[in-house]
Image (cartoon, rainbow, N blue to C red):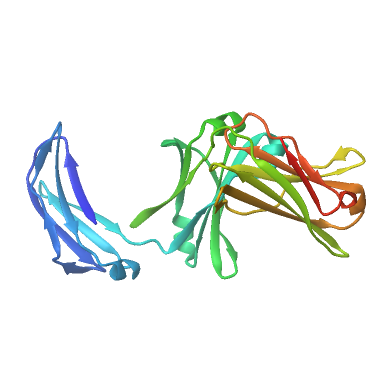
Amino acid sequence: MMCMIEDGHGGTLNSFKWKKNGVKVDDFISSTIQKIGDSHSAVSVLKVKNTEWDSKAVYTCEVTYQGQTYTKKVSKGPITVTLNQPSPKEMFNNNQTVLDCVITGQDKAVVDEIEITWKIDGENVTGQTGVATSEDGQYRKTSTMTRSHTEWKAAKKVSCSAVREDMTPIVQELTVNKGDGSEPKVTVLIEEIKPSEVTVVCLVFSSVLQDYYIAWSELKDNVSGNYVNGINFPEQKTPKGYLVTSVYTTTNKESEKKVFNCNVWPAGRNEAMTPHGVSLSQGNSHECDK
């Protein structure tokens, strides 16, 4: 790990010191003050084994410069950060993109102190962060970022960061794969019929890597209900391209009168594709090419 001090004016560097959990360590190297452009800086580098870093030890860098001591602490954060894909139902119902960044950890105080920040293509953007809640022995805090479809259509990469004093920032990134504009092949299957529920599957195949936002809707008496999320799986590489799978399970009530529509919105497009549907009266499979 590296510790750097920088100043606009040249000065006297007295010393660098490193500590591990408050105990002095000596396995580091340091430079003298160097002038680079309009600034003056010096660095110190401490070598740390992976096993020691994973032990959640706290490392302290102390720099004495111009007679004043500056201190910075760092440790591996005892948390996990998950950046979820955009919610398809929000895209279809509200024409907006909603992403959640979820922080989980066992120490409530740590989770409470975490600040969650967002960036789109390197530019800072705002999100709404809730309070920590408890679930299954873990504490969770979620930050939600909402953008219009126009803004999201232009995005190439989004990231969320968990930031806390004395902890190395933890960053999760999501790259938006927009493909080459070619149309995918969509297949809808009735996977399973039970007395109480029906499960249908949507398969989206493309020859190139492409993100697809998939939501489900039910058509009854030519009236379509709201869009809902199914279980969407990450793309799988196949010998001829990429396959994205979405699974939707719903009640079996009056299912023989319904058409189950798979709605696919390719990333970067202005509009979604024409829905692809299946009904019990059509048999086990209904396949369409657009």
Tell me the residue at 28%/58% (across/down): 73
Left or right of 263, for residue 75: left
Residue 244 % position (x, y): 62, 49
Task: Report the front residue among 135 and 289.
Answer: 289
Asked whether the viewer can see residue 4, the reply is: yes
Split into 4 quadrants, where in the image is the C terminus? Answer: top right
- As drawn, 227 above or below 102: above
Residue 9 % position (x, y): 12, 35
Left or right of 176, for residue 75: left
Task: Report the front residue among 180 and 69.
Answer: 180
Tell me the residue at 67%/34% (across/down): 95
Residue 114 % position (x, y): 45, 54
Left or right of 24, for residue 84: right
Asked whether the viewer can see residue 164, the reply is: no
Based on the displayed image, in which of its 4 quarters is residue 207 positioned? top right
Task: Report the front residue among 108 and 20.
Answer: 20
